[in-house]
Amino acid sequence: MDSLYRIAVDDQARWAWRRDDGYALIAGDPIRDGWSDLHETGERAPLEGTELLPPCGRSKVLGLAYNYRSLTGGSDDQEPLFFFKSVTSLVSSGQPVRIPAFVERAWVEVELALVIGSRGFNIAEEEAHRFILGHTVGNDITAVNIHGRDHHLARSKGLDGFCPLGPCLLPGMPKSNLKIETHINGRVTQSGNTGDRILGDAATVALLSRYVTLEPGDVILTGTCAGAMESIVRAGDVVAVSIDGVGRLETRFV
């Protein structure tokens, strides 16, 4: 099945497939209804000028830290940390992100993101795939000067606009060992592979659901590779984070 886009039509969020002649609007909501009953309505929205929305629900965002071996010296011994980002941190591909004046230094992180499709708690790893609706691309932005002062990650990562997500939702499970990259003004600052993760998709869902009930529309950022410290952004920068076979997410900082 083709990737789905969530777009704004007449001030409402609608789901659509991208076609040559525009976005083909669909009946149904994959987060609410799953993938099986989706069908085109015959309506079209133009490719140019249509506002993209984050391909998820307005629900919680969870993220993993230190889930790539390139950040742990190759060790699998320590369980990755996890944190929350605010709902208002979510923005879509192409939407500008403002860096607040009190943020002296910020960096970006390319991440493979999961979108949850079913409610679950304490999910067994072998059952976890049934709870994943699809995948998209995330950019986990961090206010570094706040991160260094706090003893937690919520404030440094939860600022408004600090979680660009999209541009589309890929159904099912993508292939493993996907190339991930960050480009700032065309310069590569991160380059890695999802096969370097300590916890894959299923293990991530199992871990987080031990502590938190996962709900349809929730987003899980699965961690980033080395290079975030070199991925400092400033007003005027244009960032593209990409994952092979999943998508390319662009953000302009103001």
Image (spheres, rainbow, N blue to C red):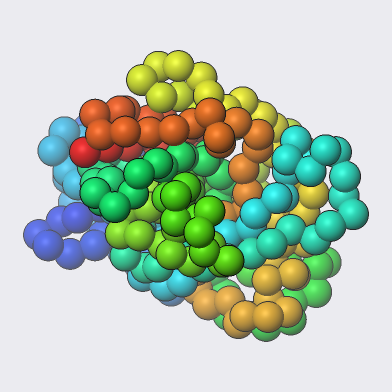
Asked if residue 196 is positioned above or below residue 189 in the image, the reply reads below
Question: Image quadrant of residue 130?
Answer: bottom right
68 to the left or right of 181: right
Residue in the image at 38% along x and 33% along y: 233
Viewer-closest of 162 and 234: 234
Question: Image quadrant of residue 64?
Answer: bottom right
224 to the left or right of 207: left
Spot occupied by residue 34 in the image (x, y as percentages of width and height): 50, 67
160 to the left or right of 184: left
Asked if residue 116 is positioned above or below residue 68 in the image, the reply reads below
Question: Image quadrant of residue 157?
Answer: bottom left
For the C terminus, the quadrant is top left
Residue in the image at 57% along x and 27% along y: 190
Using the rendered image of the protein, determine whether residue 227 is visible from the camera's viewpoint: yes
Asked if residue 173 is positioned above or below residue 58 in the image, the reply reads above
Residue in the image at 28% along x and 46% along y: 99
Q: Residue at the top extreme?
A: 187
Residue in the image at 80% along x and 74% along y: 124
Using the rendered image of the protein, determine whether residue 115 is visible from the camera's viewpoint: no
**How many numbered discs, if any?**
0
Viewer-closest of 149 and 163: 149
Asked if residue 82 is positioned above or below residue 6 in the image, the reply reads below
Q: Residue at the left extreme?
A: 10
Spot occupied by residue 112 in the image (x, y as percentages of width and height): 58, 45
Spot occupied by residue 68 in the image (x, y as percentages of width and height): 73, 43
Spot occupied by residue 147 in the image (x, y as percentages of width and height): 50, 55
